[in-house]
Image (cartoon, rainbow, N blue to C red):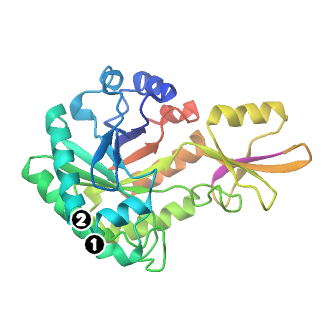
Amino acid sequence: MEVLGFHLPYNKAGLVVIKNQQRIFNKILPAWLELAIDGKIKIFEDASLLHEYMTKEEIIPMVQNMNLAGNVSNGIIMDQGAIENFIQDSLAYLEKRGYGELCLDIEGVKYENKERFTNFVDRVAASLHEAGISLSICIPAKTGNNADSTWSGAYDYKLLGQIVDRVIIMAYDFHWPGGPPGPIAPLGWLQDLIDYAIIEIPLEKIYFALGLYGYDWPLLAEERGRGLVYKQIEEIARRYQREIEWDQESCCPYLKYEDNGVEHEVWFENKRSIGLKIRLLQEFQLKGVAFWRPGQEDPGVWELF
């Protein structure tokens, strides 16, 4: 099973893990490229640092639309000029630097733009393939067609799986900061995601992205959860003298504590929960796993490989 890792530019904790565990990673996907509303790409890279540990063949630059999210994705796919700008900028960047693959992480696409988005990906893939460059895509997790989903409905698993070379399904945020507390990726949910994905996408293209982080939810209706890395969770357990507990139903760890009269729930992933997920992916002989992201994790996770 291949192991991929996501990386944010100049993230020191991530670079340390990539350095120390480089034998584990087949590919690193750095979020170096940001998509603008006109289709142009902005470059934010720490290539000189990452190249100390990974070769060009082991790096897949990733383009995201995170800052403007749906405004960018829905605007570009309806603008032929913007699409052409994106293709030309991407090719120029990849060919100049000698990278053989690009990863798309385009989120917030509206369901009514499903066909337009698929056509956009098809056009990008055709242009890259003509230049001998591969295309990967990150897509939201779902257990069915989900036509009514504002998050995942626009992503056509079957067609995208035919177009691109690598499909990375983002299997996290089952519970998210804006909702009630709970496991970030229950094991049973991952099973359901796999069951749907293997019907729609060739096995040799399927990767599941697993989160390595946690969320801390204050049990107050008006407050959102906040993201935590594993070291912070350990510190909370020590400071409040709380034991890490195990939820049998979701096969995920959690802890509860009280601060200034407010009860909190913290849900996260650790070596045990990630190990169960890895085993499940291996049972289905999927191509690989991707981690969001190295530097956030229980260090014991790397002992699984």
The residue carrying mark 2 is 120
Q: Main secondary structure of the magenta part?
A: strand
Please identify the quarter of the rendering in which residue 272 is found.
Answer: top right
Q: Quadrant of residue 157?
A: bottom left
Q: Nearer the viewer, residue 260 or 257?
A: 260
SS of the residue under disc 1: helix
Q: Residue at x 46, y 50 (%)?
A: 67
The residue lying furthest to the right in this view is: 261
* Residue at left offset 16%, top offset 45%: 91
Residue 22 shows in this picture: yes
Q: Determine the secondary structure under disc 2.
A: helix
- Looking at the picture, which amino acid does disc 2 mark? Phe
Point out the residue furthest to the top here: 52
Residue 10, how many percent across, how many down? Answer: 44, 28
Give the Cα distance between marks 2 and 1.
Answer: 6 Å
Characterize the local packing of mark 2: few (<14), some (14-19) or many (20 or more) Cα atoms within 10 angstroms: some
Question: Do tag 2 and tag 1 residues touch (Cβ < 8 Å)?
Answer: yes
Q: Quadrant of the C terminus?
A: top left
Q: Is residue 162 visible?
A: no
Give residue 298's position: percent from left, percent from top: 59, 34
Q: Which residues are magenta?
A: 251-257
**Image mark count:** 2
**Mark 1 surroundings within 10 Å by alpha-carbon count, few (fewer than 14), some (14 through 19), many (20 or more):** some
Q: What's the residue type where badge 1 is placed?
A: Arg
- The image quadrant where one finds the N terminus is top left
Task: Read off the residue under disc 1.
Answer: 116
Above or below, 122 relative to 285: below
User: Magenta stretch containing residue 1, yes or no?
Assistant: no
Q: Is residue 10 above or below residue 247?
A: above
